[in-house]
Amino acid sequence: MSSHEEMYRENVFELFKNPLNYGKLEGSNCSCSLSNLICGDNIFVEIILKDGEVKDIRFTGSGCAISIACASALSEDIKGRNEKEILGMGLNYVEDLLEIKISAGRSKCALLFLDAVKEALRRCGDSHRRSFDVHGEDINKKMEEFI
């Protein structure tokens, strides 16, 4: 392994150990929860979206090093971007951001956070913000029924 590859592997490990933007986000108006059933990774994304732009974003969940590192790096990168930019991101973008090649077997882990962000953005219209889980169920309505 080259020193360049080693440096970026260390970066991934650091982002996993000390993730950026990890925790609950007060005042979020858009959210989504997704899981990777193959490996058990799960992510809950909360976004403050205003005028089509991500003003703030945070996540909670658990997963492998690549899943959490990607969530960490992407959460920082996505701030200030608009929905169209984010919806155009994919695996190549994530690889460029982390400066590593992600194997086909790990691509689902690497894209879990981005998929959750995209799904949250798709489900949230400017006029009607609600929170949904992976099955499309309205979390706010479920909470009202529970209370």
Image (cartoon, rainbow, N blue to C red):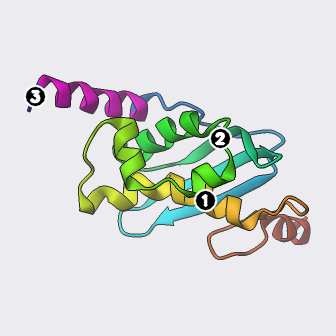
Element marked by disc 2 = loop
Q: Which residues are magenta?
A: 3-16
Provide the residue designation for mark 1. 118
Which of discs 3 and 2 lies nearer the camera? The answer is 2
Q: Main secondary structure of the magenta part?
A: helix
Residue 49, position in %: x, y? 78, 46
Residue 51, position in %: x, y? 83, 46
The mark nearer the N terminus, 1 or 2, is 2
The residue at the point 39 percent across, 52 percent down is 110
Which of discs 1 and 2 lies nearer the camera? The answer is 2
Provide the residue designation for mark 2. 81
Q: Is there a contact, CB below 8 Å, between mark 1 and mark 3?
A: no
Q: How many marks?
A: 3
Horizontal side of residue 95 vs 22, given as left or right: left
The mark nearer the N terminus, 1 or 3, is 3
Element marked by disc 3 = loop
Comparing 126 with 146, the one in front is 126
The mark nearer the N terminus, 3 or 2, is 3
**Amino acid type of the residue tagged 1 in the rendering:** Lys
What is the C-alpha distance between the residues marked 1 and 3?
Answer: 34 Å
Res. 99 mark: none
Horizontal side of residue 80 vs 70, given as left or right: right
Provide the residue designation for mark 3. 2
